[in-house]
Amino acid sequence: MTVYVEYVLIDNLVIDYLLLKATFSLTAIKVGKGRLLFCAFFGAMVALLYPLLESHALLSVLLKVLSGFFIVLLAHPFNSVRSYFINVAVFFAYTFITGGAITGVYSLLNIDYSTETSIAFMIIPVYLVIKGLRSVATYLYRRKDVACLTVECGVFFGGNEIKLNGFYDTGNGVYDGDSPVIFCEKHTFMQVVKERLAVIKLKKINVDTVNQTSENFCVKLEKIEIYNNGQKNIYNNVTLCLVKGCVGDGYDLILHPALMESNYENKFDKKAKKIS
């Protein structure tokens, strides 16, 4: 196979840089661009030795593995062995996945590995795969945050109870007088008030958003029960407000941070709090 040294050097320099940057981005470790570039350059120089070891497959694999361990170690002074090995594992995971992506693209497009074009073309699938993996990781992380702030609720109005899922939104600072406001979409709102809709008088409150101020229909709940960590917390003086569109995926209510358990002493399995 013909080896184009300049293409191999540039290609591995860019790919190793992307892999290292993606690794430390995922593990939330700050590493300077200069440091990453230096480590990537070292990895690229080692890659020049791979073609020379084609007849020694085991030695070639060992060199690749050791170089991966070394450039991760070179990039950052880790506080613990555990942290180091986590970053090594992430780096190799990215390497294997992107390697598979390159193989897949080459096979799909029937590209010969031994051409100049094929060597230069490696960067494109690597970049796209890393970008995709980062997007997936970010999405899963956000979903984890959502799951941690999602609780089961019992909403009481007109003598009826409806079980709903609520999400604590720390950015919700809306009050109706001294009553914290929670939000829901039309379908949920009608579930709560439908049996009393003909006999109650809906009120309106002003809700300020980034883009505008709007008047929204609302009702004062009899109470809301929030179930968290096996405990039932009861809150009175809470306003349920209707919003246009969907409040979010996986929950029915946007809760007020004043209803978070951590804001109150919790000495009993069941407690009642009036927020004022």
Image: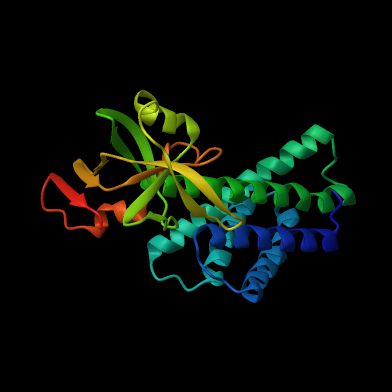
- Residue 49 appears in the rendering: no
Q: From the viewer's perspective, tell me whether residue 221 is left or right of residue 17.
A: left
Quadrant position of residue 34: bottom right
Q: From the viewer's perspective, tell me whether residue 71 is left or right of residue 123.
A: left
Residue drawn where x is 75% and y is 54% of the image: 51
Coordinates of residue 275 in the picture (x, y in percent):
25, 55
Q: Is residue 247 above or below residue 209?
A: above
Residue drawn where x is 31% and y is 29% of the image: 162
Residue drawn where x is 47% and y is 74% of the image: 77
Coordinates of residue 158 in the picture (x, y in percent):
28, 30
Quadrant position of residue 202: top left
Q: Front-most of 271 and 17?
A: 271
Colour approach in the figure: rainbow
Q: Front-most of 4 and 12?
A: 12
Q: Front-most of 160 and 260?
A: 160
Coordinates of residue 71 in the picture (x, y in percent):
58, 66
Q: From the viewer's perspective, tell me whether residue 119 is left or right of residue 28.
A: right
- Residue 242 appears in the rendering: yes
Quadrant containing the C terminus is: bottom left
Q: Front-most of 39 and 161?
A: 161
Q: Is residue 189 above or below residue 237?
A: above
Q: How many marks?
A: 0
Q: From the viewer's perspective, tell me whether residue 68 is left or right of residue 56.
A: left
Q: Is residue 49 above or below residue 256?
A: below
Residue drawn where x is 85% and y is 39% of the image: 111
Q: Residue furthest top?
A: 195
Q: Residue furthest left?
A: 268
Coordinates of residue 145 in the picture (x, y in percent):
43, 49
